[in-house]
Image: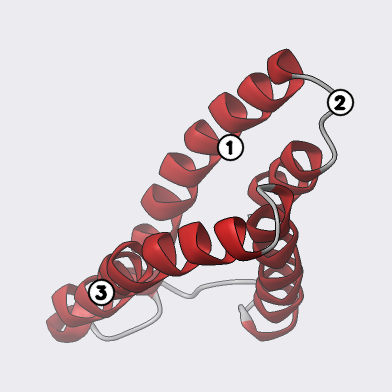
Amino acid sequence: MALFTICNLSAAVSPNYTTLLLSRIVMAVAHGVFFGVGAACASSLVLKAKAGSAIAVMMGGLTVAMVVGVPLGSWIGQLFNWRTPFLIVTGMGTIAVLGLTWLLPREISH
């Protein structure tokens, strides 16, 4: 999540197309890894019988982000400039990293 957030900041301040493209590629890889690790964490934080539900709730967040966030980000980008959605996601990512650091248990028993 931290790498995803840093890549969004890098994209927002990129001085040229090459930097933007590299930031977006690394961001895409970080996004995929985050959801793999997130699914494993979600399933290990609940009882075995609830593991599927925990993963479904986590993946539901991805679906909502795509359905709501992508058009909203596009609209914000057209309203202001193309860098603004990246800065907003950087802020949201920072909050997510802090939340994960604070709320995720240091050790998972199973």
Counting from the top left corner in percent of width and height, residue 68 is at: 35, 73
**Mark 2 residue type:** Pro
Residue 7 found in image quarter: top right
Left or right: residue 96 versus residue 109 is right
Left or right: residue 68 versus residue 87 is left
* Residue drawn at 61 percent across, 65 percent down: 79
Distance Cα–Cα, label 1 vs label 2: 17 Å
* Residue drawn at 64 percent across, 47 percent down: 4
Counting from the top left corner in percent of width and height, residue 38 is at: 43, 61
Label 1 belongs to which residue? 27
Distance Cα–Cα, label 2 vs label 3: 35 Å
Neighbour tally class for label 3: few under 14, some 14-19, many 20 plus, Cα within 10 Å: few
What is the secondary structure assignment of the residue under circle 3? helix
What is the secondary structure assignment of the residue under circle 2? loop
**Mark 1 residue type:** Met
The colour scheme is: secondary structure
Which badge, 2 or 3, is on the more N-terminal residue? 2
- The numbered disc on residue 90 is none
Q: Is residue 66 above or below residue 43?
A: above
Which badge, 1 or 2, is on the more N-terminal residue? 2
Residue 41 found in image quarter: bottom left
Label 3 belongs to which residue? 60
**Mark 3 residue type:** Gly
Q: Are marks 1 and 3 in contact (CB under 8 Å)?
A: no
Label 2 belongs to which residue? 15
Residue nearest the observer in this picture, 6 or 46: 6
* Residue drawn at 75 percent across, 69 percent down: 91
Counting from the top left corner in percent of width and height, residue 93 is at: 67, 65
Q: Is residue 66 above or below residue 110?
A: above
